[in-house]
């Protein structure tokens, strides 16, 4: 059997003859490259006898790049830092993927080719419609059908083993739910709420005085005895629910919250003017701050605990696989 270090040297030498190793810090530059065929490449990791290349990590990370660019627009340093973190996370995920695939090969599992054929046909039908469209798409991406088929097989194996080793082991007991609820009361606190009806009149411009005058006329009618609900039905514009809705202070825009939370039940505001609209609000009910009852949040707590347990169990599983598999990460 070939010594692991000799294997690494041989694999690295083979790739380095073709490509120059690219440091992770240069990752932002290469995300401008459009196609698989154009990827600059180099070894990022070796898992047993499988190489994880820079191009594979870059391709895996690419879907997140546009979202990062949008989120950190105008913040180049923050974008570069987040991109590097995302790239590292992608590398970790690809290494874990190879660990799982290696465990499949060494622990006696078997996936019949007929099952893979069925998975491939399902993917073609669901995503491409027919084989001709698939082949054209693969050609445009610089990918072969064999690579496409192997990717589907690997995805199925990884998903199946994760389910077997992680998801099926998790049982969330009522005691764990109740204990989490008692120790995280602040997460379930609802601030003071008010139930409002609103009359909303949209301005045609910031200095639109006609809309302001109309709002004052409506206010006068209400003070004269007209029902707020009737005025709301006739005049309101926008998406406010006619039967009223409950609001916390932080949900309302500041101009509305500052007025509404100082009104008494049954009281109608003066005209509240913003650059875009004029408002009249009626406070129908108030509700003091409270902690949501357990029955209302039980499902959310179970999901949180399940996610936490999955992360813990999966880490333990991956750590066990790492102890049994040769791994080398390159800087």
Image (cartoon, rainbow, N blue to C red):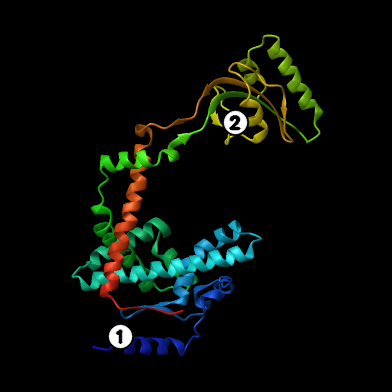
At a point 60% along the width and 16% down the height, the residue shown is 266
- Which part of the image, by quadrant, shows the N terminus? bottom left
At a point 59% along the width and 63% down the height, the residue shown is 78
Secondary structure of the residue carrying tag 2 is loop
x and y, in percent, of residue 63 in the image: 50, 62
Secondary structure of the residue carrying tag 1 is helix
Residue at image mark 1 = 4
Residue 206 lies in quadrant: top right
**In this picture, residue 77 sits left or right of residue 201:** left
Residue at image mark 2 = 239
**In this picture, residue 278 sits left or right of residue 156:** right
In this view, which residue lies farthest toward the front?
183
At a point 22% along the width and 67% down the height, the residue shown is 112
x and y, in percent, of residue 159 in the image: 31, 60
Specify few, some or many for label 2: CA neighbours under 10 Å numbering under 14, 14-19, or 20 or more: few
Q: Is any atom of residue 15 visible in this view? A: yes
Residue 157 lies in quadrant: bottom left
x and y, in percent, of residue 219 in the image: 71, 17
């Amino acid at each position: 059997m070939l010594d692991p270090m000799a294997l690494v040297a041989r694999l690295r030498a083979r790739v380095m003859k073709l490509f120059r190793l690219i440091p992770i810090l240069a990752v932002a530059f290469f995300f401008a490259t459009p196609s698989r065929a154009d990827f600059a490449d180099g070894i990022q990791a070796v898992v047993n006898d499988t190489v994880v290349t820079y191009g594979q990590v870059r391709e895996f990370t690419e879907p997140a790049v546009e979202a990062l660019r949008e989120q950190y627009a105008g913040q180049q340093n923050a974008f570069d830092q987040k991109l590097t973190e995302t790239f590292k996370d992608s590398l970790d995920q690809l290494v874990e993927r190879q660990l799982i695939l290696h465990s499949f090969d060494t622990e006696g599992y078997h996936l019949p080719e007929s099952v893979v054929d069925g998975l491939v046909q399902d993917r073609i039908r669901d995503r491409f419609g027919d084989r001709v469209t698939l082949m054209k798409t693969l050609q445009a991406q610089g990918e072969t059908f064999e690579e496409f088929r192997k990717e589907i097989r690997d995805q199925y194996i990884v998903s199946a083993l994760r389910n077997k080793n992680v998801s099926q082991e998790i049982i969330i007991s009522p005691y764990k739910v109740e204990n989490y609820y008692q120790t995280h009361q602040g997460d379930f606190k609802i601030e003071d709420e008010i139930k409002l009806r609103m009359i909303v009149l949209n301005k045609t411009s910031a200095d639109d005085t006609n809309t302001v005058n109309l709002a004052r006329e409506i206010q006068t009618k209400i003070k004269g005895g007209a029902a707020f609900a009737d005025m709301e039905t006739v005049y309101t514009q926008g998406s406010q629910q006619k039967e009223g809705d409950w609001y916390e202070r932080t949900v309302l825009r500041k101009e509305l919250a500052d007025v509404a939370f100082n009104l008494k039940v049954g009281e109608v505001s003066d005209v509240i003017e913003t650059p875009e609209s004029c408002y009249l609000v009626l406070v129908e009910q108030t509700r003091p701050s409270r902690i949501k009852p357990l029955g209302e949040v039980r499902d959310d707590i179970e999901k949180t605990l399940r996610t936490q347990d999955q992360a813990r169990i999966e880490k333990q599983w991956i750590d066990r696989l790492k102890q049994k598999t040769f791994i080398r990460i390159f800087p």
